[in-house]
Each structure stands twice: as C-alpha cells, then as structure tokens.
Image (cartoon, rainbow, N blue to C red):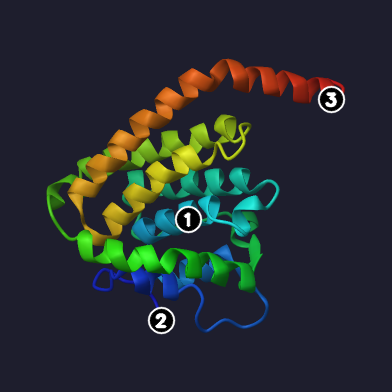
Amino acid sequence: MSVSDGHRNITQVLDCVVHQVDGDRVTLEDILRRLGTRSYGPGLFLISLISMLPPISITPGLPVITGSVTLVLAAQLLVLRPYPWLPRRLLRVSFAQEKLERVVARARPWAKYIGVVVRPRLTLLVMPPFLNVIAIICIGLGLMTFPLAVLPAGENIPAAAVLLFGLALTVDDGLLALFGLTASGATVGALIYFWPKIVGLCMELADAVGY
C-alpha cells in the first residue's frame, strides 16, 4: 500500500505507515517507501505529526531529526525533484512500531474530520511557482526548529506550520496553504519573542557542559 498522486485520503496516508510491517521497528525509509514516489506532502505531514504527538515526540533529540528531515525534503521540493531522497543516516532512524501505531491512533479521529473539511481548492497556490515558495518557507521552518527546540515543546510551533503545508500539498488545498503561511508568520514571531530566553538557555547549557 502506498500513497500516490491519485491516492490522497488523509486517513489512508496515516494507515499506510502502520500496515505490512516486518519486525518491531519502522524506519524513515520504510515510511517514505510506503508513501510512494510523490510523497513530499504526506512526508512533511507525517514528520511534523511525529514531532508533535507523544509517545514518539518525547524521544530525546527528536527535534534535530525532524528538523533535518524537513530541511532535506523541502530543499528537494524547491528544485521539484520527482521523488524525495534522504541521507542513509536519516533513513535508518527508526521508531518502535507500537509507538508509531499509537501516534496514528491519536491522529486518526481528527484526520477523518479534517478529511471531510479539506479538499482541492485554490490549487494554483500549491503549484509552481507558489509551490517553490512553500518549499522555501518549509526550509525556514526546519531551520527554526533547532533554536525553538530549546524551549519546552518549542519544536511544535514550526511543526504545526509544516503540518498545514504538508496537508495542503497532500490534498491540493491552497486555502490550507494560506493557513500554513499564517502559522509560519506566527513561528517567526515566536522566535523573535522568545529569542532572549533561547539565548539564555543555550548559555546555561554551555556553562553546564563546561564551555
């Protein structure tokens, strides 16, 4: 089971990452393979979902992984690469299958509701050159993940914007992309507002490790 251009149901996007699994763990490579060749939208959606929802979201160091994956996917989307590629080290990152199933179970109820609300509209806004603009914004969101992750659950702020863009690309919903743009502006505002606190926490961490 995979998600292709003609297979854009949000619930099916969620289900495709938990079916036909061999073993107790699932890698990012497994997820991308199941999503299909045109998986930028579903890929951005799922990586932000993993970043936001427990139990996987509480994994130490996860913001570094999700921010990096967002950066790599968005950079390839910017140049309109037909299918995504990730470095082998990122592809090998794995999660317990049970934890991934719990994330999907948490998301499935509201995914069914959203699946009724979102639909193809204003599709011009999810096509080039606007698609390239979305990719640039997602690159920025991926970069902002790293400093915001210093704050408790701070990585959820850019992840929410990436999730909206990922959904927009999955269902060709330009209106949802506009909501993603608004959320991106809020992310920039949050970074500016919390910057002194972020710097202070980073300095405390540097002192704690002896730098």
The type of residue carrying mark 1 is Leu
- In this rendered view, identify the residue nearer to me: 146 or 81: 146
Say whether residue 37 is visible: no
> Residue 83, how many percent across, how many down?
38, 61
x 12%, y 49%: residue: 122
Tag 2, which secondary structure? loop
Where is mark 1, residue-wise? 49
Question: Viewed as shown, does residue 127 lie left or right of 141?
Answer: left
Where is mark 2, residue-wise? 1
First in sequence, mark 3 or 1: give its number: 1
Q: Is residue 55 above or below residue 73?
A: below
Placement of the N terminus among the 4 image quadrants? bottom left
> Residue 18, how many percent across, how many down?
51, 76
- In this rendered view, identify the residue nearer to me: 174 or 179: 179
Mark toward the viewer: 2 or 1:
1
Label 3 – label 1 distance at C-alpha: 32 Å
Circles 2 and 1: CB atoms closer than 8 Å = no
Placement of the C terminus among the 4 image quadrants? top right
x 39%, y 76%: residue: 2
First in sequence, mark 2 or 1: give its number: 2
Mark toward the viewer: 2 or 3:
3
Q: Residue furthest right?
A: 210
The type of residue carrying mark 3 is Ala
Tally of numbered tags? 3
Question: Viewed as shown, does residue 83 lie left or right of 33?
Answer: left
Label 2 – label 1 distance at C-alpha: 20 Å
Question: Viewed as shown, does residue 160 lie left or right of 210?
Answer: left
Tag 3, which secondary structure? helix
Tag 1, which secondary structure? helix
The type of residue carrying mark 2 is Met
Badge 1, how many Cα within 10 Å: few under 14, some, many 20+?
A: many
Where is mark 3, residue-wise? 208
